[in-house]
Image: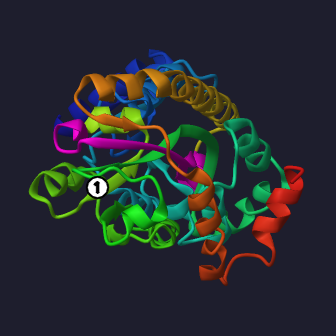
Amino acid sequence: MMFKTIAASAALTGLLLAGAPAEAQQKPTVLRFGHMNSPTHIVNLGGQRLKAAMEKAQGGPVQIDLFPSAQLGENSAVLEQLTLGSNIITQVGPGTIAQYVPNYSVMVHPFLFKDWAEVKKVADSPLVKGWEKDLVKHNIKPLCFFNFGTRDLYTRNKPVKTPADSAGLKIRVQPVAIYTEMVKSMGGQPTPMPWPEVYSALSQGVIDSAEAPPNAIIDQKHFETAKFYMKTNHILDAAMVVMSLRAFNALNAEQKKTLETEANAACDWMSAESEKVYDSSVAELEKRGMTIVNDVDRDAFAKAADSIQKAFPTWSPNLVADIRKQLGR
């Protein structure tokens, strides 16, 4: 009798499943989008747009869960999780990607690009696209570049107008080589530090200075502990959105196509928002009590930055010169 009951139950379950819609039987693929910015930052807002689009993806919904404010860890740690196969999407700088493919760090070389159109031209060129074949060896699938913002220098209590003014300053940098070399060229002391620790380091005097786009400074309330903002415009910050290649390959063809299309749309939106908010963000920093220093000797800083490429022997030969040639300079 027991065996008959089990058999009947199994048959009934099979009939119920057979009659259920296919989408009810199939759980959506789940991807985690982790980054170090706040929930109101453009990266998280761009992530929300991607999330909404993928819930209606052709080929079946893909669920993207957002983890802002370094919930999954610092950038390089999240990227490492991704390379090891975790179902992760993340926003990361080319300087961090460069630990796997060194050439990428040239995309944030100080004073190399005049505007975002130049960055985009190089990012979309066969030169940079050619590096993707080396990324896939590390399970990294690049989705798109976007304009994270124009990076400027800011200090706790001292205006900086020339490289000589920054001599001896302890300047926070991302824990990647291109930023370390940039600060060295400025004459400062590079101090690698995760982004979430910068506020307390500024307030306690552990560092004298940092550098970031103005909206990122507002996002983290660094205006509460830093009083001078220099419009150095030293880097047009070409951030990247990348994901696990294994997770990408697990999607069906329609889902892949939708993800690539919608990721590019999200990146274009973030770029447009970033460019729109630069001037208003600088004005907001001034309103919040920071002194804005406009008369920075950018030519002096740019000339000093020419030495940076010597610190990267693993770059392709004449890489900076080739990019300048591509840009008609």
Query: Is residue 237 something one can see in this rendering?
Result: yes
Amino acid type at circle 1 is Gly
Place of residue 196 in the rendered image (x, y in percent of width and height, measured from the top left): 24, 51
| Residue drawn at x 33%, y 54% as measured from the top left | 210
Provide the residue span drawn in magenta: 221-250
Relative height, residue 151 to residue 198 (above, below): above
Magenta-span inclusion, residue 12: no
How many marks overall?
A: 1
If the image is split into quadrants, where does the C terminus sit? bottom right
SS of the residue under disc 1 = loop
Residue identifier under label 1: 73
Display colour scheme? rainbow
User: Which quadrant of the figure has residue 217?
Assistant: top left
Query: Is residue 109 something one can see in this rendering?
Result: no
* Lateral position of residue 35 relative to residue 241, left or right: left
User: Which quadrant of the figure has residue 299?
Assistant: bottom right
Place of residue 40 in the rendered image (x, y in percent of width and height, measured from the top left): 32, 26
* Local crowd size for mark 1, using a 10 Å CA cut-off: few (<14), some (14–19), many (≥20): some
Pick the residue in front: 250 or 32.
32
If the image is split into quadrants, where does the N terminus sit? top left
Magenta-span inclusion, residue 231: yes
| Residue drawn at x 44%, y 50% as measured from the top left | 87
Place of residue 230 in the rendered image (x, y in percent of width and height, measured from the top left): 41, 44
Residue located farthest toward the bottom when viewing the structure as drawn: 313
